[in-house]
Image (spheres, grey):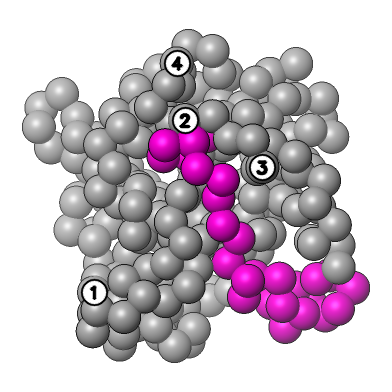
């Protein structure tokens, strides 16, 4: 049995370009599906958040229209209820990477607010990348990579093939013209080799120990890849 660290946003809002606070948090499917996949394979999941705050779910991620209908929404809601670790997170500041076999970051707009500028998370990501342990990051969570500084002072993920929520998807979601910055643009600026799949379709990119997914529907195949790598 492996022990996997889920690093979840502690933000409950995302500050838009005009200064307004858009209610958000983590995206339910991106936490629930990997949790279910990994625990079904016999692994243990521990949740960490900045300051150990109980994370907020983005209420929009529980809607039927983003879960394939009411049945899908009910299943995700039930999975969220069963994910007890979300209600008792450890403080990210107290995490010892040596205690874990893999690291996973679910998305939602929350990481754009806090993890993108969180130095503790940035150091953890840099250490996880260097360790060779499986590192999975999905949707908006690659925003956390912006805080990952390598030994040379540059970004630790420069040159890596990866993906994340695209400009096209942000446009279709209605936020591209409201955001302070777009994730795809910032990942390209840091020197990553950004790969883009079809909007909303499952799309996973692997490069060495890094496994990234583009959007919520990429959570399941990303989790399956982590299970495979954990043996």
Is 50 drawn above or below residue 174 in the view shown? above
Image quarter of residue 156: top left
**Structural crowding at the residue carrying mark 2, measured as other residues with C-alpha within 10 Å and reported as few (<14), some (14–19) or many (≥20):** some
Determine the CA span between mark 4 and mark 1: 33 Å
Percent across and percent down for residue 173 are 49, 83
Callout in the foreground (2, 4): 2
Label 2 vs label 3: CA separation? Answer: 12 Å
Earlier sequence position, callout 3 versus callout 4? 3
Residue 130 placement, left or right of 211 = left
Of discs 3 and 4, which sits in the foreground? Answer: 3
**Where is mark 1, residue-wise?**
180
Report the residue marked by disc 3.
Answer: 87
In the picture, the disc for residue 96 is 4
Task: Look at the numbered disc 4 and give the secondary structure of its residue.
Answer: loop
- Outermost residue toward the right in this view: 71
Can you name the residue that lies furthest to the left here? 153
Residue 28 in view here: yes
Which of discs 2 and 1 lies nearer the camera? The answer is 2
Disc 2 target residue: 91
Relative height, residue 80 to residue 42 (above, below): below
| Range of residues picked out in magenta | 48-73
How far is disc 1 from disc 3 in space, using C-alphas? 30 Å
Q: Is residue 156 left or right of residue 206?
A: left
What is the crowding at mark 4: few (fewer than 14 residues within 10 Å), some, or many (at least 20)?
few
CB under 8 Å between discs 2 and 4: no
CA gap between label 2 and label 4 equals: 11 Å
The N terminus lies in quadrant = top right
């Amino acid at each position: 049995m492996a022990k996997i660290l889920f690093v979840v946003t502690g933000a409950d809002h995302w500050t838009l370009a005009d200064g307004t606070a858009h209610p958000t948090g983590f995206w339910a499917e991106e936490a629930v599906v990997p949790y279910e996949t990994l625990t079904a394979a016999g692994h243990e999941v521990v949740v960490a958040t900045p300051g150990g705050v109980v994370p907020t779910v983005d209420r929009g991620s529980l809607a039927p229209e983003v879960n394939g209908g009411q049945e899908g929404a009910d299943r995700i809601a039930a999975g969220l209820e069963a994910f007890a670790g979300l209600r008792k997170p450890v403080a990210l500041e107290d995490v010892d990477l040596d205690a874990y076999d893999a690291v996973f970051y679910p998305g939602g707009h929350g990481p754009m607010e806090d993890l993108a500028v969180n130095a503790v998370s940035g150091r953890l990501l840099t250490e996880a990348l260097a360790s060779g342990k499986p590192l999975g990051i999905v949707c908006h969570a690659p925003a956390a990579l912006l805080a990952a500084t390598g030994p040379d002072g540059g970004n630790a993920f420069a040159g890596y093939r990866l993906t994340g929520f695209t400009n096209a998807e942000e446009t279709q979601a209605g936020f591209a013209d409201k955001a302070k910055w777009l994730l795809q643009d910032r990942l390209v600026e840091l020197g990553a080799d950004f790969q883009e799949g079809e909007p909303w379709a499952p799309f996973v990119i692997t490069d060495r120990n890094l496994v990234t997914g583009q959007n919520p529907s990429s959570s399941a195949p990303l989790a399956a890849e982590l299970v495979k790598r954990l043996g």
